[in-house]
Amino acid sequence: MSDRMRWRYGDTNPVVAAVDSGTIIEIGDLVWQDADDAKPASDITDQGSETANQEALADAFLGVAMQRSRNGDDAPIRVATTGVFEFDCPSGTFELGDLVGADENAAGDALLNQQVDKVAAAAYAIGRIAKRQAASVTSVLIDVRSTVMTGGVEGTTPSAA
C-alpha cells in the first residue's frame, strides 16, 4: 500500500518512535511497538487466527504512522496516538461506538496495515466508529486509541473535534 494521510480531525497527540533500518512503514499504517521500535501491523507474528492477531496488535498498538520509513532508513517517525482517521474496511454498516481492529489478509496469516473491520470485543480493538454508516460503505471514520500511550479503547472518551 502506498502512503495515505488518513487523519481527519481531533488531537493526534503524536509521539516520535524509533524504527529499525529494515522496517518499511508507510504514512497511514497502523503501527505497534515491538520492544523499542515501531513496526507495521503486518509485521506481527501470525498467532494462528484473526482474533489472536488482532489481540496481539491491540495489546501493543502505538498508533497511526504520520511519516514514512523506507528500507534502510533509521530515523524516528511521528506516530499519532489518538484522533479520528479514515480507513478502508470490508463492505458493511457501522454504528457509533462499534469496536474496530485491523483486518486480516485473504490468506489469513497477517494483518493489513491500512484496513480495519468490526471486532467482537475491546481486547481486539484499536478504535471505535466515529461516524454512523446506516448504508453499506467501504471506508469508515474511527477514533483511534493507542494502547501504549493511552491505555487503549476500553474506558476512553472520544476525540474532540
Image (tube, rainbow, N blue to C red):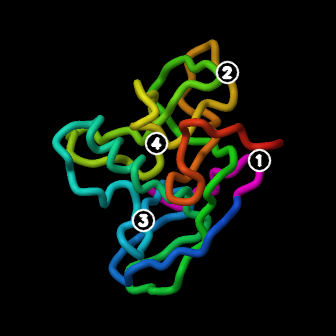
Question: Going by the image, does 70 lie left or right of 64?
Answer: left
The answer to which of marks 3 and 4 sits earlier in the sequence is: 3
Q: Name the element at disc 4.
A: strand
Q: Name the element at disc 3.
A: strand
Residue under the point 45% across and 86% down: 74
CA gap, disc 4 and disc 2: 18 Å
Of marks 1 and 3, the one in the foreground: 3
Residue under the point 61% across and 30% down: 129
Task: Identify the residue position indicated by label 2 in the image.
Answer: 132
Residue furthest right as drawn? 161
Task: Identify the residue position indicated by label 1 in the image.
Answer: 9
Of marks 1 and 4, the one in the foreground: 1
The amino acid at mark 4 is: Gln
Residue 152 lies, in percent from the top left, at 53, 46
The answer to which of marks 2 and 3 sits earlier in the sequence is: 3
Task: Identify the residue position indicated by label 4 in the image.
Answer: 115
Residue range corresponding to the magenta coloring: 1-12
Residue 103 lies, in percent from the top left, at 38, 38
Disc ID at residue 155: none
Quarter of the image where the C terminus is located: top right
Residues under numbered marks 1 and 3 in contact, where contact means CB atoms less than 8 Å apart: no
The amino acid at mark 2 is: Arg
**Based on the displayed image, in which of its 4 quarters is residue 128 positioned?**
top right
Q: Name the element at disc 1.
A: strand
Residues under numbered marks 1 and 2 in contact, where contact means CB atoms less than 8 Å apart: no
CA gap, disc 1 and disc 2: 16 Å
